[in-house]
Image (tube, rainbow, N blue to C red):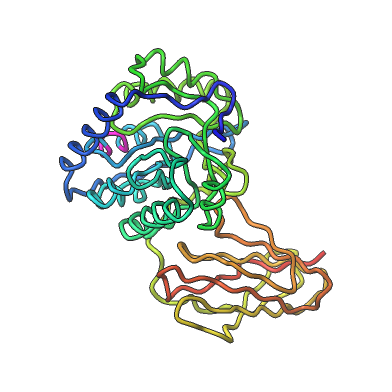
């Protein structure tokens, strides 16, 4: 089964045009070499935003990634970069520059193959290899996956989910891959509505030239660039903080004082630590109907919880645990995912 969303059907490139694009990407990947790009992005002011859209760029990193990041930074844009694993492996510094610039990183397969023709084990290997390359280069483990050409089926979605990734297609196709002019790209982006996602590509000059006009149009309609929620696949408000290198030592002072108006405290201990994961036990004092907010450090992820009802923010790294009548102690297991030093931070404890 091929997945398609409205007017967003994925480009059906000819074999020849796909080969041309692939060769261009491989050639330009070498050009950037080991040069890092030191740029940063500032999220648009939340006060001016009546909604959020997801600007996404596929097929990077390329030799033009630095130029793209400079344009995004100049226009106060944070975007989602769906990277190809072999390009990341060939140019890890450019992938790292994306993260340093505040961009979110997604998995776009190892070499942009037609994945629906693969068996389950081959799909698993492809996506795992890509995740490993991205994490090695950036310290970030992808939570989003975009299938090449938008081609998907239930097996591919299941494999992506098993690796902790949400599949993301798109609502609007910029047609930049198809030779669209700057004005055509701008017009296509003008169809974006709150929560929707647009497909664009790294390495295309017309796309970079269109970004200022795209932003002017979005701003005129009260729409701001946002992050794509790993829970829903829709664009939501960014967390406001560009990713940073994870700390190498555990935070101290795990007992926390509740914010103004709170009447409880929460204390965390770590009764079990293994080579790849550890348990956290949190004891709440001062109330029975409690809510505790816990923040993780990327790329660590919680995979099991008990004695509470959890929910997650759009970043996937902030957990809100609510009492469920099982007492005043709850716990969870965290997978280290290569970061063995960090421990969860308790941000708040409230009752009511």
Question: Would residue 244 be seen by someone viewing this image from the given angle?
Answer: no
**Closer-to-camera residue (283/54):** 54
Q: Is residue 67 rendered magenta in the image?
A: yes
Q: Quadrant of the C terminus?
A: bottom right
Q: At x 49% / y 47%, what residue is drawn?
A: 144
Q: Is residue 169 rendered magenta in the image?
A: no
Residue sticking out furthest to the bottom: 271
Q: At x 40% / y 47%, what residue is drawn?
A: 102
Please provide percent x and percent y for residue 30: 16, 43
Quarter occupied by residue 15: top left
Q: How many discs appear?
A: 0
Image vertical order of residue 59 relative to residue 105, above or below: above
Q: Quadrant of the N terminus?
A: top right
Quarter occupied by residue 322: bottom right
Quarter occupied by residue 3: top right
Q: Tell me: 26 left or right of 228.
A: left
Image vertical order of residue 265 relative to residue 152, above or below: below
Q: At x 27% / y 45%, what residue is drawn?
A: 87
Q: At x 58% / y 44%, what residue is drawn?
A: 154
Q: Tell me: 310 left or right of 1.
A: right
Q: Main secondary structure of the magenta part?
A: helix
Question: Would residue 132 be seen by someone viewing this image from the given angle?
Answer: yes
Image vertical order of residue 293 relative to residue 250, above or below: above
> Magenta residues?
65-69
**Closer-to-camera residue (164/236):** 164
Please provide percent x and percent y for residue 251: 48, 75
Q: Tell me: 220 left or right of 39.
A: right
Please provide percent x and percent y for residue 316: 56, 56
Please provide percent x and percent y for residue 23: 21, 34
């Amino acid at each position: 089964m091929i997945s398609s969303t409205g007017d967003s059907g994925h480009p059906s490139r000819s074999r020849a045009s796909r080969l041309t694009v692939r060769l261009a990407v491989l050639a330009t990947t070498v050009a950037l070499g080991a040069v890092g790009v030191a740029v940063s992005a500032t999220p648009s002011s939340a006060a001016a935003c009546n909604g959020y859209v997801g600007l996404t760029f596929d097929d990077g990193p390329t030799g033009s990634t630095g130029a793209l990041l400079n344009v995004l930074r100049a226009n106060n844009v944070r975007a989602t970069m769906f990277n190809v694993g072999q390009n990341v492996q060939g140019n890890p510094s450019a992938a790292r520059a994306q993260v340093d610039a505040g961009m979110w990183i997604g998995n776009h397969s190892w070499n942009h193959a037609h994945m629906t023709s693969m068996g389950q084990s081959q799909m698993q290997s492809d996506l795992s290899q890509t995740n490993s390359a991205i994490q090695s280069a950036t310290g970030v483990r992808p939570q989003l996956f975009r299938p090449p050409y938008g081609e998907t089926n239930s097996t591919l979605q299941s494999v992506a989910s098993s690796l902790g990734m949400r599949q993301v297609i798109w609502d609007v196709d910029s047609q930049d891959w198809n030779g669209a002019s700057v004005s055509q790209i701008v017009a296509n982006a003008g169809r974006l509505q709150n929560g929707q996602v647009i497909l664009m590509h790294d390495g295309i000059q017309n796309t970079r030239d269109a970004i200022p006009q795209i932003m002017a149009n979005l701003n005129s309609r009260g729409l701001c660039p946002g992050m794509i929620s790993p829970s829903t696949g829709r664009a939501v408000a960014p967390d406001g903080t560009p990713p940073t290198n994870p700390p190498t030592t555990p935070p101290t002072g795990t007992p926390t004082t509740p914010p103004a108006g709170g009447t409880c405290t929460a204390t965390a201990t770590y009764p079990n630590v293994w080579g790849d994961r550890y348990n956290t036990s949190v004891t709440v004092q001062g109330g029975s109907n409690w809510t505790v907010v816990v923040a993780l450090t990327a790329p660590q992820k919680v995979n099991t919880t008990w004695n509470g009802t959890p929910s997650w923010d759009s970043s996937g790294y902030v957990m809100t645990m609510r009492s469920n009548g099982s007492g005043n102690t709850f716990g969870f297991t965290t997978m280290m995912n290569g970061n063995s030093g960090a421990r969860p931070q308790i941000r708040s404890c409230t009752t009511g």
